[in-house]
Amino acid sequence: MSEPFLLIQNVRKAYGDVTVVKDFSLEVEQGEFVSFLGPSGCGKTTMLRIVAGFEVPSAGSVIIGGQDVTSLRPNQRNIGMVFQSYALFPNMTVAQNIGFGLKVAGVAKAEAAARVDEMLQLISLPQLGDRYPYQLSGGQQQRVALARAMAGKPQVLLLDEPLSALDAKVRVSLRDEIRAIQKALGITTIFVTHDQEEALSMSDRVVVMHGGMAEQVGTPFEIYNRPSSKFVAGFVGTLNVLEGTVTDPATGAVRIGDDDVVLKQSLNGARAGDTLSLALRPEAIALGKQPGRDASIGGTISEVSFLGSVIRVRVGLGKDAVSLDTFNNPAKPPPKVGEKTEISFSSADLLVLH
Amino acid sequence: MTTQTPTATKSIMSRLPLNWLGVAPFAVFVTLFLFLPTMNIVIGAFQNPAGEFTLANIQGLNTPSIISAYWISIKISLASAILGCLVGFSVAAAVTLGGLPRWIRSPLLTFSGVASNFAGVPLAFAFLATLGPIGLVTVFLRTQIGIDLRSLGFNLLSFWGLTVTYLFFQIPLMILIITPALDGLKREWREAASILGATGFQYWRLVAFPILFPSLLGTLALLFANSFGAVATAIALTGSSLNIVPILLFAQIRGDVLGDPHLGYALAFGMIVVTGIANTIYIWLRARSERWLK
Amino acid sequence: MNRFWAWLALAGGIAYFVLPLLGMTEFSLKMRRGVYSFDAYAKVLADPKFQETFTYSVVMALVTILFGVLLVVPTAYWVRLKLPRLRPYIEFITLLPLVIPAIVIVFGYIRLYNTSSWLPLTGSVTGTNALLMFGYATLSLPYMYRAVDTGLRTIDVSTLTEAAQSLGAGWITILARVILPNVLVAVLSGAFVTLAIVLGEFTMAALLNRPAFGPYMQLLGANRAYEPAALAVIAFAITWGCMALIQIVSRFAPKAPVNPH
């Protein structure tokens, strides 16, 4: 296995008696796109700023390309950064902004100009070199910020919630652009966001952070389908949480509502009578008995929302309730509130939460 | 584009005059007590006693003592403006960007508000009591450190004395105006410059100063105009002995020392021109910097 | 920026400002030979001329403030409500007194409103007092207008007006009972600045020959040694007191409402 390009080892950051980052470690491969995902205050931005060099860790180290950069100043690390507020220099044109790092490094004028043109092509804004930032839209400004960060061929690219200040439509299109550019150039990238859709769609791996620690690290598929904790399960995607009482720890039988379900997972030493939190994704549930799903629970329909192509149904199961979507069928009217029905799912999809 | 019906047009027309009536008192006031007096002076500068148009008054300004008065006024205004800018900027930068404790800022701005209005007679006395012949600092320097200000050529009642005294309200004015501009320097610009490889010095040279430049230059112009029009301090300090324009005008209004009332008009007109140009520069530069930082 | 240099700059600034104030205060206490005393202050406060001119200036300040409020508040309100496009021009006009020196303005007054003009204000004592008051109002216009305008910005003028109108209030009621109470803090702030300006003003009062505080200070300065210093300390203390009051008063100002958009 090759040496990881970016190594974060046991980093801790405390301000006085408040510890914002607690013992964070991560290995990132060359060219990988990793997201730090979490709610506000979870320490993801602080961790990013430690990698950038704007914050000095209370403990731990950051190693890039085999070199320990922990004590280096930001302007010595050859890292590119894109800020949430774009941070373009208002007194310079687009071209001058992009060429700033090159100018500071003393690159020859002709070579720098060629590189700036190259970057302008990359972000698909070849005509806007002479414009000033205040003349550009938010999306354009952020692309310029990206070009500026990458013009100096940095070893690592850091993005601090770059899409949060943009309109929804621009956000989605820029998301794909950033990913495409990153793949083409092969730069090791860390992307901080609180939007799980962004993290899941763009990343090779996702680090879900909570309370200054990494709760789970994995591919988007792993994070979503095999969340390791209640927090991860709840933060990423929607989740139905049910309460089940263990009836037979040997077979893994659990009673939910009025029915029994046999779990195909280990109950981790739970004894009869214990209550477990069980999670079920809405897309794993079907209305009525369906082939291929071995578990079913009876319930009553409590809410029906007709959303056009999708019908959102809420089914009460005793104390709990689950939300699920079914597709609209022109030939069949939607279910009625108060109808007795069953939900069916595969028992392997029922997750035990810790 | 829809065409307006006659009735709609008429109702808009009838609404307009009524709205404008609301600002009538204000209009009357500024006309009577700001515009008319100023225009009277401006026009009077171009009139002879018979009421005919003439440039003689302006030409009459071309005497050695009057030219020298304008020149000294301009020099003092420039000196106090430039020094005020430098010192005021240093203090403001120290407080906003220098990492000093937060609680210093508010008292500093309040004090600057007081000090920028502290002119005239009290200011002159304060400096006389400090740097005058038997002033606190003068005596201290002479007896404790052995430096005799007099023998070094320093005289409070002169060009440099007036400049140093004027700084007392120029520096606070600079602080008051430049602090918001310094606040406007976003922290992200500093960080972005740093991560792109710039040192602190390069950041200031390539990013911060160019951004601040219009504000700096504009405030310099404002300080210049402020100093040029100051009368009371000068009179209190030098007792009408220093030959600067405001004192000259004052004496002229009081007692027609120049022997020709219309020359007074020309003097005043000259003052308006100088302060007008300086303030126009200030307003133009401020508008420009605001456009950038939208 | 290096913290050391920051402290140095601040220390230098403080030294420059504290020394003259110190010098002035120290000097004012030296009237009795060899010992510090308040003799100078006692003499000044007992001087009938001091009481006369100080009273005159304070009264003039109050009248100026009243006039300023009656002129500026309705105007600023009206402009915000009905003529928003006029605002930049009005703002420009209110800044003109900072451009045109006071000495030029009062020169214009003397030329324009003397005994042989259509409005012979300088012909009588009352007339000249009125003229001086208008002059003071002009000098304080920039500060007064800006204070009131800032205060109006923090309240939603048009909605308040519509609400009052729908409840049957006329313009005067709206101004006096709805608008004014809400901008009272801003108005007070402008009033204190006006007080400071009027008390210290010299040029206009001297050239119009009125017994104001400014010319009195000047006269004293030309003839006496220690009393002027005491007077300067008093003047500075009053100005400082005004500003401190502004700070305290503006703590109670309503903050701008958070825009939900």
Image (spheres, coloured by chain):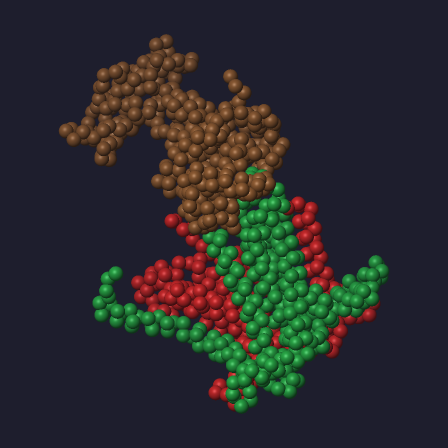
B157 relative to A325 in the view: left or right: right
Q: Residue furthest front?
A: A110
Letter of the chain shown red in the rendering:
C
Q: Residue furthest top?
A: A250
**Picture quadrant of residue A239:** top left
The answer to whether residue C94 is above or below residue C8 is below
Nearest to the observer: residue B278 or residue B230: B278
Residue A171 image position (x, y, % from top left): 38, 39
Residue B241 image position (x, y, % from top left): 72, 77
The answer to whether residue A102 is above or below residue A228 is below
A84 relative to C52 in the view: left or right: left
B278 relative to B145 in the view: left or right: left
A233 relative to A49 in the view: left or right: left
Nearest to the observer: residue A159 or residue B251: A159
Residue B57 image position (x, y, % from top left): 58, 83
Residue depicted at 30% across the width and 22% down the height: A284
**Picture quadrant of residue A311:** top left
Residue B87 image position (x, y, % from top left): 66, 57
Residue depicted at 59% across the width and 32% down the height: A57
**Picture quadrant of residue A141:** top left
Query: Is residue A144 something one can see in this rendering?
Result: yes
Letter of the chain shown brown in the rendering:
A
Residue depicted at 35% across the width and 23% down the height: A279
Letter of the chain shown green in the rendering:
B
